[in-house]
Amino acid sequence: MSEQKEIIEGLSAKELFLPGKGVTYDGFIINPGIADFAFSKINLKTQLTRNIAIQHGLVGAPMDTVAEDRAAIAFDLEGCFAIKHYNNTIDEQARMVGNVKAANPDFINEPKVLPQNATVADLKQIKKDYGFSSVPVTVDGTLDSKVIGLLTSRHARNNDDVPVEAVMHPAGDRLENLTTAPEGTDSDRAQELMIQKNRKRLLIVDDLGRLKGLVTAKDLDRRKSHPHATVDSNGRLLAGAAVSSYKEDKDRIDALVDAGVDVLCLDTAQAAKKRIVNQAKYIKDKYSHIELIVGNIATIRQAKWLYNQLGNRIDAWKVGMGVGSICTTPDVAGAGAAQAAAVYRVSLWNYLNSLDIPVMADGGIRGSGDVVKALACGAKTIVAGSLFAGTAEAPGEYVYEEGVRLKKYRGMGSIEAQREGGEKRYRDAKEQILVSQGVPGFVQDKGSLHHFLPHIIKAIKLGFEDIGYKNINDLRQAVYNGARIFEERTAASLAESKPHNLVKYREEPIGGK
Ligand code: XMP
């Protein structure tokens, strides 16, 4: 085809996101491109924080109806991440962090152990508190003393007052029958040994016979089926938790770090405040190994001010103000920013200043299409509440309304959530009056995250194939280089993109439930 005069098809990001224009995810669409690569080549690996990469940038929001330990473990196993909320006591939140760190997909490096003189009641208590059914026994119940036996769920069937020594495996003089392996054994060798010795559990011990780890066949199988799990440098699941700017939360921060947290999220409704700066300094100056997410912000002005105060203490920005599905802040405070534009502007400012601080696009994500758009706006990950609420692993019980299975999902700024601790996100500790900035509601049952997340991820990849990019960086680079891939949506184009001309239709939920 001979080159005619150039016909301009789409808008560049600069043309779409004009200053002062409140562009939302619904306000634009990304034009299709050319997928000159196989679908299998699409890779969504991304930066969660400056120093942590994850396979899929989907993050469960720090909300009490979204992310506790059970959900966090599922997110991690699927290569995603979740931030545990702070509407709880310090002990409760620290225990959740401990549970995530202990739910090792590979080796359990610090298993719960019992002393020689424990009883079956103690074993039952561990199962109740932590859900573990394999419990090694050491001489004095610490990891530093010699391992002498192993208890499993079979042993918990005995009466409470039976001493574990009387029932544990191996009993008495058959101590050499305990299946052990030396430190440094990798998962393939561990599996080999377990098959050889026909055992479902393997104890890792040092030269002095002290316990260094526990491997179970179940964990190894789980690990194999989740090759992209989000783990720390020791192969343990990555744990994240939210904290507030309250002075009292310094104790919470210390406890969470003790429990093994990897990522802290300083989670507030508006981060550009002096007390947020003080808390961020407390965290990073005391615990430089912790990755710190700072949020929420929605403008370059806020980012600049915070960066001037905190510099490289910030390991990720959480961007989004007044855009959550349960949020009423723009009506209450008259403040906020359209989300797509906010994500684009803060990301661009980072990029132009060569700051490698990933932007997490928080709130307003309704499905995979919005994720693709958020990534095109420059986000490295998305944070969502309503999208992940209602899953089997989200906190809360299911209820039925008119035959539909629902779970509660509420704003952390709703009065009921604020009364249980959520107020820390919205006001200073000294203020007495609670102002509602969110609503409580319900969302539909979405099944297990282990089913739901892979569906969303596949849908995002389909989006990348349609627009012709095989990874997030290529897309981002093209946008910053001025690629004309955006189209502004008119009301008519929005209507056109929904089912129409049908007498009746049934919405098919994501995940094909
Ligand atoms: P989505 O749209 O994913 O939004 O349900 C979740 C995000 O909304 C924020 N959030 C709130 N914002 N009032 C607000 O103004 C609230 O009560 C509230 N609760 C949560 C938060 O950033 C979350 O990740």
Image (cartoon, helix red, strand yellow):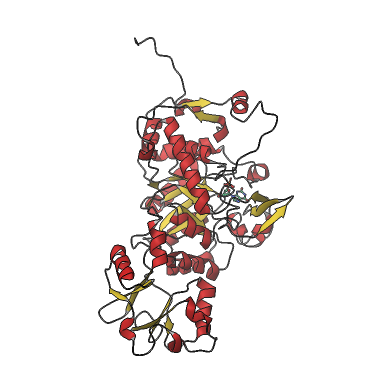
Rendering coords of residue 292 (x, y %): 43, 55
Tag count: 0
358 to 475, vertically: above or below: below
Task: From this view, report whether residue 169 is shown above or below residue 108.
Answer: below
Q: Nearer the viewer, residue 251 or 237?
A: 237
- Placement of 436 over or under 32, stated as above or below: below
Q: Is residue 121 above or below residue 440?
A: below
Residue occupying image coordinates x 34% and y 86%: 174
The part of the image, by quadrant, that contains residue 333 is top right
Residue visible at 46% across and 42% down in the picture? 458
Instruction: Say if residue 460 shows up in the picture.
Output: yes
Q: Between 272 and 412, which is closer to the camera in this rendering?
A: 412
Query: In the figure, is residue 162 to the left or right of 189?
Result: right
Where is residue 223? Give x, y as percent: 39, 59
- The residue sitting at 39% across, 37% down in the picture is 39
Q: Quadrant of residue 218?
A: bottom left
Q: With 193 as the anchor, is 319 left or right in this view?
A: right
| Image location (x, y in percent) of residue 494 | 60, 28
Q: Quadrant of the N terminus?
A: top left
Q: What is the residue that sits farthest to the left in this orientation?
A: 207
Q: Nearer the viewer, residue 442 or 128?
A: 128
